[in-house]
Image: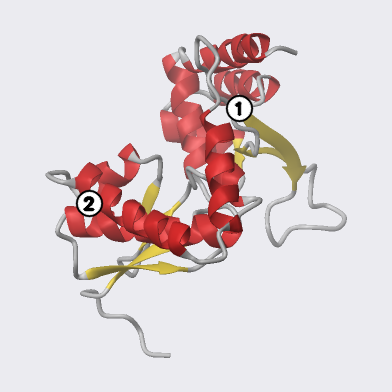
Amino acid sequence: MSPTDAGLDALADLSNLVDPVRRRLYEYVVSRSSPVTREEAAAAVGIGRTLAAYHLDKLTASGLIEAGYARPEGRGGPGAGRPAKHYVAAERELSVSVPARSYLLIAKVLAEAVAADTSGAARAAATRAAREIGQTVSAGADLETALRGCGYEPVSTADGDIVLRNCPFHQLSKAHVDLVCGLNLELITGILEGTDERADEAVLAPQDGRCCVIIQNSRASKPAG
């Protein structure tokens, strides 16, 4: 398949998000850290279960989300009922550029070059650049807007920290974990500096399903232990 054909196929799949109800359902599913049932999704966007099921299945068919079956936590064995259908964000990534572009390819080239530089000079330069770019892109913006503008999906926790539901560099990080996570940390530190949120601290805390960096709120009181 040519890059143009692949781009057109991705465009067809992404067109499913033109429908406002379908888009709201998609945004709700991908914002959750756990699987979402039809009933939960319907309630979240204020529509009926049947209509929600229709749109969720369309999103699944296009590869934008994934579906599975499971019983509610704590329920099992005879009398537990049938497993409920649930939905989660898809691992698949979709991007469209007309004419075809491949920014990920040049990113891989640069990452390979940094990794091959045994002097450490290239990594040091990339680290400085990441921090400076974070400061630049966030200047004059609030923290959430700046993070979303870079592709992160910030979610505040009960203790005031911020977890990032999406890693904008997920594909590249598969082959260059240390490099990409380190640059992620510097970029987000720069964003904190650019938005004057210096009391907060970006720290590495890798976990499946989210960015490797979290932002700790040093001003909030944390429970002991």
Residue most extreme to the front: 119
Mark 2 near mark 1, Cβ–Cβ under 8 Å? no
| Residue 17: % across, % down | 49, 18
Q: Is residue 80 left or right of residue 99?
A: right
Looking at the image, residue 161 lies above or below residue 172: below
Give neighbour class at mark 2: few <14, some 14-19, many 20+ (Cα, 10 Å).
many
| Residue 82: % across, % down | 80, 42
Give neighbour class at mark 1: few <14, some 14-19, many 20+ (Cα, 10 Å).
many
Tell me which amino acid carries mark 1: Leu
**Which of pointers 2 and 1 lies earlier in the amino acid sequence?**
1
In three-dimensional space, the C-alpha distance between marks 2 and 1, rounded to whole angstroms, equals 32 Å
Mark number displayed over residue 135 = 2
Mark number displayed over residue 122 = none
The residue singled out by tag 1 in the image is 64
Marks 2 and 1: which is nearer the front?
A: 2
- Whether residue 51 is visible: yes
